[in-house]
Image (tube, rainbow, N blue to C red):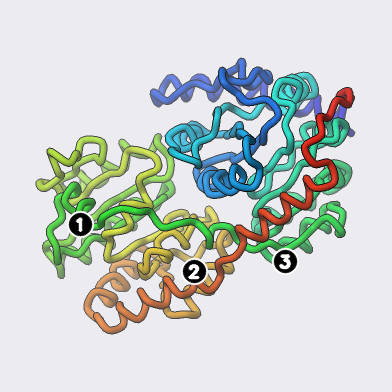
Amino acid sequence: MYRVYGALTALAWAAVLPYQMVMAILQGTPRPSLRERLGYPPEGAPRGGFWVHAVSVGEVRLALRILPELRRRFPGAEVHVTTGTATGRALAASAAGDARPASVGALPFDLPFSMRRLIERLRPRAVLIMETEIWPNLLRLCAGRGVPILLVNGRISTRSYPRYRALRPLLRRPMREFTSLGMQSSEDADRIVDLGAAADRVRVTGNLKFDLEPPRVDPDEVRFRLGVERGSPLFVAGSTAKGEDAAVLHAFGILRAAKARARLVLAPRHPEDFTSAGKRARDAGHVVVTWSRATADRPAHASDVLIVDRVGFLPALCAPADLVFVGGSLVPRGGQNVLEPASLGKPVLFGPHTENFRSASEALVAAGAGFVARDGEELGQVLLRLLEDRTGYRVASTMAARVVEMNRGALPKTMTMIEEALAPVGSADRRAVLP
């Protein structure tokens, strides 16, 4: 099985890597590091610490949430973070304080020689994989060396489950190599067991996204940088996917027709969409400024649409917002994190496609804090209704924060799982030979 998988992986990367290189050149983004893909760690990568893999921005935010706890509970342990996207890497590298990893690199090709090389150089105390990433050779080599490998905040969405089930014959053996699997819900736990995980190693730890700390920013300062006066309605549309900008701008047009001072902050999820989002807003007749050009000394007073063209700022931009739409949900992408704005006490708007955050979005809707819109017209009408019903707005805001608060607790459960997984081996030096 591993030979067949290895051959398929090599063929896939032979096709994908040149494409990534070309797209990086065309889009002006950092090129993927071939050296890191071959298993060579970046300079300063720690030896004997934790290796945390977080594929993209959402997973990196979770990783940065647990890093201070890892340092507190395992004094002296450093952390190497691997990511799969340039945006995720940028966010990890920009972390500060106890959340800052010792080093950040790319995940190697999941081939024996590249994975073996990085494991040999890191000699990790444990490997933590955020959400659900199943890399058979990484799992096999860690198990052969006695390195605990844990799935943290695992989930198997309704959308991805059929695809995983189709690969079940290939996944069953690698799934048995996990030391522990912390899943977000009992449904996720049942699905991961069905795919081959050992039932006695699976536990429900809850969703770490409920435990993310709200950004510590001054909403008035953010509004000043945005050039938005107190009392002017501020609509933030975050993590929008391709095909959603037009609907958001249509909704904003409805809002602005009734509230002439309304402003829009539009944050596409992918950097390659920054330029096209700005062009679409200008074509709709709006004055557009980018976040990178709006500074404390030169706020964006002259614009009515601001395009967020930098990674990692969206949570802070939600803090002064009156209305927040979460993207990836008007198109069939499964939706993005609805809990970040909810934790700030914001009524949350989203489309019908929220499979990635189904339980959270359902909880918000049930509490009267989440609102579903099927298209731009409906989104615009919901925006107006919320702004005009101030009592209803205050209730929705209160309930949004309450939903998040009532569901916290995944972080201590996750840390307990990690401690228990490491307890049998402690900090003993593992010198087993890699298979």
Where the C terminus falls, by quadrant? top right
The answer to which quarter of the image holds residue 90 is top left
Amino acid type assigned to the residue bearing label 1 in the image = Asp
Can you give x and y, in whole percent of width and height, for residue 63 in the image? 57, 45
Asked if residue 432 lies left or right of residue 115, the reply is right
Q: Nearer the viewer, residue 201 or 381?
A: 201
Asked if residue 175 lies left or right of residue 43, the reply is right
Of badges 3 and 2, the one in the foreground is 2
Can you give x and y, in whole percent of width and height, for residue 218 in the image? 26, 55
Nearest to N terminus: mark 3 or mark 2: 3
Give the CA distance from mark 1 to mark 3: 42 Å
Q: Residue drawn 85% across and 29% down? A: 4
Amino acid type assigned to the residue bearing label 3 in the image = Glu
The answer to which quarter of the image holds residue 319 is bottom left
Mark 1 residue element: helix
Q: Which residue lies under the disc numbered 2?
A: 404
Q: Nearer the viewer, residue 250 or 346?
A: 346
Give the CA distance from mark 3 to mark 2: 20 Å
Q: Which residue lies under the disc numbered 1?
A: 220
Q: Residue drawn 31% across and 82% down? A: 392
Q: Which residue lies under the disc numbered 3?
A: 187
